[in-house]
Amino acid sequence: MSGRSIADVAVGDELDVEIRNASRAQLFLYSAATHNPHRIHYDRDFAVSEGHPDVIVHGPLQGAWLSQYVTGWAGPRGRMLTLTWQNRRSALPEHDYAFRGVVRGIDGDVVTLEVWAEDGNGTVLMPGTATVRLPSS
Amino acid sequence: MSNVTAPPLVPPETHAMVGEPLGEPVSAVITRREAQRYARAVGDLDPIYFDEAAARDAGYDGLVAPPTFVGHSVVEGATLSDLRGDGLWMDRGRKVRLGVSRSMFGGEEWEFFVPVLVGDTITAQRRLGAVEEKDGRSGPFVLLHYETTFTNQRDEVVAVSRLVGIAR
């Protein structure tokens, strides 16, 4: 079956860039699907009262995007072993965020990735790392 | 020097909770509908979450739940009268008391050991890992580290999450 194997990967490889942009409806659906009633994600006045410019994208939703970015790169036979991220800056709905990554290490069949999300100015919102086990062929 | 001292951001009883479980373990069955609702809400339409044949082709024993879904699968919620002013649930287990109230998510570290499949029964046990007081550009804040261990119906640890909450 198809999919990435360890032989396809070299240290320094850059992952294809993917763009994510959350609509307000997506924020609502994500709150519903995760049973999350936190008002900073749907009540703009409340979000502003806590110092945010608008409602903000859930940190774990950005983490789930990062997970999707990594597992999509790894392919169906890859297995994500670890995923870490820091939400350093808030992400806003109706804004494009670019997901990027670089292969930083290969140890046997395990690949270490540096992955991150950045805004339109290239400012990193969310740095992260992942390790992925890939099939040998 | 003033004799007036501001109340601590992290009171002693909160420091004393570090390392301890926050309430009883919580269990939940991973249902296809909830896992797929989550995948759709994220926008992750990987066939291994939706098509059992695709999941088996990829080497799984059945339909897969998105890796980070496991953390949400055990959320029980509470009654509407138990919502705080900011919408968050009041703590169901032991309350982590702080001198600040505005909450944000700061990041997470996941280790995934065993795939979580639809039909699995997952049990989560959460602990308070550490509490740190910090000084930031906009004032002092607190980092709360929560560690959650997820086990399945075979007592296999499927994943561990180390989540950072920011309170300011």
Image (cartoon, coloured by chain):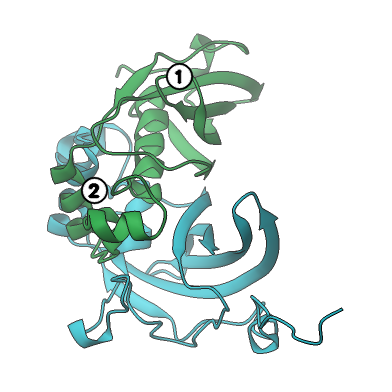
Chain colours: A green, B cyan
Residue hosting label 1: A121
Q: Nearer the viewer, mark 1 or mark 2?
A: 1
Identify residue type, mark 2.
Gly
Q: Secondary structure at mark 1?
A: loop
> Residue A94's quadrant in the figure?
top left
Identify residue type, mark 1.
Asn
The tag on residue A32 is: none
A11 vs A8, nearest the viewer:
A11
Q: Is residue A77 visible?
A: no
Count of picture labels = 2
B57 vs B101, nearest the viewer:
B101
Give the x, y percent position of residue A129: 57, 35
Give the x, y percent position of residue B53: 16, 37
Assess disc 2: are there few (<14), some (14-19) or many (≥20) residues with their C-alpha within 10 Å of its C-alpha: many
Give the x, y percent position of residue B97: 55, 83
Query: Can you say whether A96 is above or below B149 in the image?
Result: above
Residue hosting label 2: B62
Q: Secondary structure at mark 2?
A: loop
Q: Are marks 1 and 2 on the same chain?
A: no
Q: Is residue A116 visible?
A: yes
Q: Quadrant of the N terminus of chain A?
A: top left
Q: Residue furthest front?
A: B1
The reply to whether discs 1 and 2 touch (Cβ–Cβ < 8 Å) is no
Q: What is the CA distance from the residue labelled 1 to the residue labelled 2?
A: 42 Å
Give the x, y percent position of residue B162: 55, 58
Assess disc 1: are there few (<14), some (14-19) or many (≥20) residues with their C-alpha within 10 Å of its C-alpha: few
Residue shown at 45% from the left, 19% from the top:
A121
